[in-house]
Amino acid sequence: MTGILSARGLRKRYDGRAVVDGLDIELARGECFGLLGPNGAGKTTTLRMLLGLASPDEGEIALLGHPVPQAAREGRVRVGVVPQVDNLDPDFTVRENLLVYGSYFGLSRAQVEGRLPRLLEFAALETRADARIQALSGGMKRRLVLARALVNDPELLFLDEPTTGLDPQARHLMWEKLRLLLREGRTILLTTHFMDEAERLCDRLAIIDHGRMLAQGEPRELIDRHIEPEVVEVYGEGVLAWFESHGKRLAARAELHGETAFCYLRDAAPAVESLKGAPALRFLHRRANLEDLFLKLTGREMRDGA
Ligand code: ADP
């Protein structure tokens, strides 16, 4: 196997249950690849195996050309990781956190000191180098964890839900930073629960559930392949009656979830027209998106931890 990261036939069982059940993943250099799936789908277990932090029961992994788990350490030297939970040291300052992390990669204090200005600038924390972690906002902490993951100048970044818990401004800034890293030619493997984020950032993505691959490809191409092009979401007083009389008849696929009717259509005009005569109903007419695809493939029922 060659290339930046590849895995074939990955399997992992916990307590007799298959958590990862035959996954093939191949990243191209310089791309942003999304790994999507509901809670419990097997994303974290997959990431842990790819990094050599958990051993697969079956399958082959090559991380930057090194077999994993046998030579995971050699592979990880040029990998940066942003974990789901911020594990910054709260007793240290911003600068100290970067220095300590650099030492894990065998970098001297002087080497990390040399990289500090760029890392701080990247994290937009130039004026906060001596601030304690508690004094940082959620967005600042997340950007610091991202900057920390760059301390070893990685070719490949593993980002586990990098924007969870951030407000919209902080998310947009994070996206800007991730695009910058892609422009520098780095490769990103990203997990996220935000479908708009995946659609925006990912060149390709995989949707998994119960440890199995449900779909893989470019976001737009996958949406076009699996979902009707137009969507009308209808809610409000009388939605059930409208769903029965019009929604089901006009849509190629129609679903009622809670208080909302989702109509998937080749042409939304007749449905929109029918709603003009129902002023109590509110509706949203939009283009099919990645969330529609995700829900079609993984279902709408709640998962553990949701
Ligand atoms: P995701 O990241 O997609 O939410 P995970 O990979 O964390 O999914 O978990 C997949 C399944 O494997 C879950 O049902 C979880 O409870 C189980 N699991 C994960 N790690 C362990 C473990 N160390 N021991 C036992 N079960 C585990």
Image (spheres, rainbow, N blue to C red):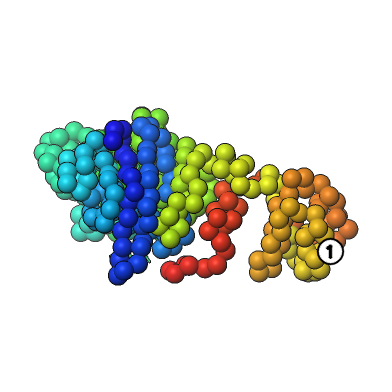
- Report whether 215 appears left or right of 95: right
Q: Amino acid at mark 1?
A: Ser
Tell me what residue is drawn at x 60 percent, y 52 percent. Answer: 292
Which is nearer the eye, 121 or 4? 4
Which is nearer the eye, 127 or 2? 2
Please indicate, yes or no, whether residue 128 appears anywhere in the rendered image.
no
Tell me what residue is drawn at x 23 percent, y 50 percent. Answer: 52
Tell me what residue is drawn at x 59 percent, y 56 percent. Answer: 296
The quadrant holding residue 262 is bottom right
The quadrant holding residue 77 is top left
Residue that carries the numbered disc 1 in the rendered image: 245
Quadrant, the N terminus: top left
Residue 86 screen position, x and y as percent: 31, 56
Please indicate, yes or no, whether residue 246 appears anywhere in the rendered image.
yes
- Report whether 200 appears left or right of 226: left
Q: Which residue sits furthest top?
A: 184
Residue 232 screen position, x and y as percent: 72, 53
Tell me what residue is drawn at x 81 percent, y 46 percent. Answer: 269
Image region (quadrant) for ligand 1: bottom left
Categorize mark 1 by other alpha carbons within 10 Å: few (<14), some (14-19), many (20+): few
Helix, strand or loop at mark 1: helix
Residue 230 screen position, x and y as percent: 70, 46
Which is nearer the eye, 60 or 45? 60
Tag count: 1
Residue 207 screen position, x and y as percent: 47, 51
